[in-house]
Image: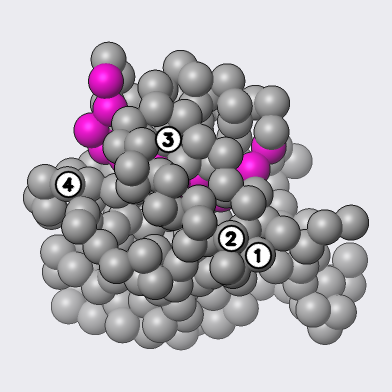
Amino acid sequence: MSSKKQILIIDDDEKLTELLKSYLAKFDMTVTSATRPEEGLALLKRSSPHLVILDVMLPGQDGFSVCKEIRKSSKVPVIMLTARGDVTDRVVGLELGADDYLPKPFEPRELVARVESVLRRLAPAAPTEGQLLKSESLTLDLGKRLALLKGKDLALTTTEFETLAFFMKNPGAVLNRDQIMEYLKGIECEAFNRSVDIAMSRLRKKLGDPADKPKYFKTVWGTGYMFIGKVAVHEA
């Protein structure tokens, strides 16, 4: 079986796409591409790539709405590209479920670093991590990378899963934003660490865990967050 990673690029800048195809090939990545949103979504269903690189500025339908469509049916990692360099664009992308963002123009090697960082978080768990972490009706399967609440798949993105895993491995510990960012390995610490707050907000929403009456996450004002549920570790 080929070890090459399959990357889907959805971007109407054909010159950039061709450049990236050649460059990513040097890092054992095979690229398929689409210049239009509907074509990209169709390719996603047919090819099941390991990761999607998605431009914000697209003809007919912007990257935000495409990301929203992707998240309706897929947990594939998404890195968004934005030419406007607006922090708001990046925040919106993260809120919609993107795993990372990169402003244009960028150095191809920086994009490769972001892609490799996200793909590392998707690597199969080590044998010692073939465990189940349980907290009441919440179960995290580290080996299968699956989060269940009352037996239902929470459909967490890569970033959300890794964030939840970090907290459930450290119950009762106050984790600040810098520690979370370092653990996630690669998400840029910008906009006052908004990416961490966004990930926490999305997790709370999926867990049905309101900040004013938390069952799992407690906000420690001025510091960070703490997982307050009791965690039991079981072998998978």
Mark 4 and mark 2: Cα distance apart in space:
24 Å
Point out the frontmost of discs 4 and 1.
Answer: 1
| Quadrant position of residue 101 | bottom left
Look at the numbered disc 4 and give the secondary structure of its residue: loop
Residue at image mark 4: 83
Please indicate whether residue 89 sits to the left or right of residue 225 in the image: left
Residue 161: % across, % down: 56, 58
| Crowdedness near tag 2: few (<14), some (14–19) or many (≥20) residues, C-alpha within 10 Å | few
Residue at 46 percent of width and 84 percent of height: 173
Mark 4 and mark 3: Cα distance apart in space:
14 Å
Mark 3 and mark 2: Cα distance apart in space:
17 Å
Please indicate whether residue 192 sits to the left or right of residue 197 in the image: left
Asked if residue 54 lies in the magenta stretch, the reply is yes
Q: Which residues are magenta?
A: 48-59
Point out the frontmost of discs 4 and 2.
Answer: 2
Amino acid at the residue labelled 2 = Ala
Task: Give the answer, above or below, for where 120 lies relative to 45.
Answer: below
Amino acid at the residue labelled 3 = Ile
Quick one: label 4 or label 3, which is nearer the N terminus?
A: 3
Quick one: label 3 or label 2, which is nearer the N terminus?
A: 3
Look at the numbered disc 3 and give the secondary structure of its residue: strand
Mark 3 and mark 1: Cα distance apart in space:
19 Å
Please state, as top left, top right, bottom left or bottom right, where the N terminus lies in the image.
bottom right
Residue at image mark 1: 28
Mark 4 and mark 1: Cα distance apart in space:
27 Å
Amino acid at the residue labelled 1 = Asp
Q: Which mark is residue 25?
A: 2
Quick one: label 3 or label 1, which is nearer the N terminus?
A: 3
Task: Give the answer, above or below, for where 141 lies relative to 71.
Answer: below
